[in-house]
Image: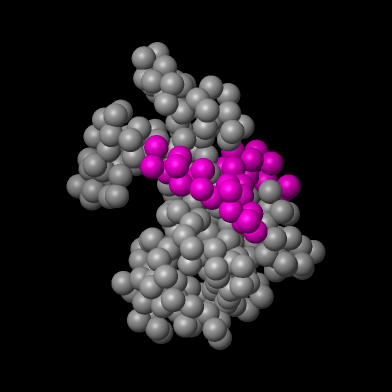
Amino acid sequence: MIVLSVGMPRAGSGWHYNLIHDLMKTTGCADARDIRERYRLQNVLTEVNCNIGVLSARRLGLVMIPALVNTFVIKAHSAPTNASRLLSTLGRLRITYIYRDPRDAMLSAFDFGQRALTKGRPNAFSHLSDFDKSMDFMMEYVHIWEKWIKEKNVLTARYEDLLTNYDVESAKLVEYLKLNGSRPEVRKVIEQYRPSTAEGQQGLHFYKGKIGRFREAYNDEQKSLLKEKLGPYLTQMGYNT
């Protein structure tokens, strides 16, 4: 079986992935990074957190070969597909999805990309050179959010809830993964990824993570445009416009 950790970019998806990965390791399941090497899946599971990219039938088929005899955790930012739905229905794919106020995620993506440029190491967000490009980029992931929340058998979480109500949200995750939350190994992982502890850990993508930072960073015109473009989605997500 595969546990698929999907997330909106800059929504704590690295944090969520590593929490899930280490929780599942308490059961003795395989490390996805080892699976990638052993089965030569470097072109399918990329980056440090084994991102599968598009959930195509081909890509999912390739990772399902080792999943016949191993359980492991992989990551994605992409939308659901017929292939992912089929595997979920068959019980071969267990899926979690995390999202964030898209205005904060958008600002975080821009900042992260520009910081990388100043260091001479451009990343996947460095092309977001202005407000309009950042907004267009984030709208793609808002539409992906819209698709994930309609999916069956998917555990959804908000970054803000995980940050401010960690005990409740981590308990939901433990239950969904069918783990014993009272086991010392499980409790140790939960404490390791508690927000106050996780901040600053390499690979978790924490930098500022402040809720509502966009209100200070964007001007009135920009905030008005965001309200116009995102208003109905923000209401459905449970955020104030």
Q: Residue at x 26, y 43 (%)?
A: 126
Left or right: residue 119 compared with residue 212: left
Residue 135: x %, y % from top left: 35, 32
Residue 84: x %, y % from top left: 51, 65
Splitting the image into 4 quarters, where does residue 62 fall? bottom left
In the image shown, does 56 or 49 lie closer to the viewer?
56
107 w.r.t. 221: above or below = below
Splitting the image into 4 quarters, where does residue 179 fall? bottom right
Residue 174 drawn in magenta: no
Examine the rendering and report whether any part of residue 198 can be seen. no
Splitting the image into 4 quarters, where does residue 202 fall? bottom left
177 w.r.t. 27: above or below = above
Q: Quadrant of the N terminus?
A: bottom right
Q: Residue at x 52, y 32 (%)?
A: 233
Left or right: residue 145 compared with residue 170: left
Examine the rendering and report whether any part of residue 64 can be seen. yes
Q: Residue at x 61, y 47 (%)?
A: 157
- The residue segment tinted magenta is 139-168
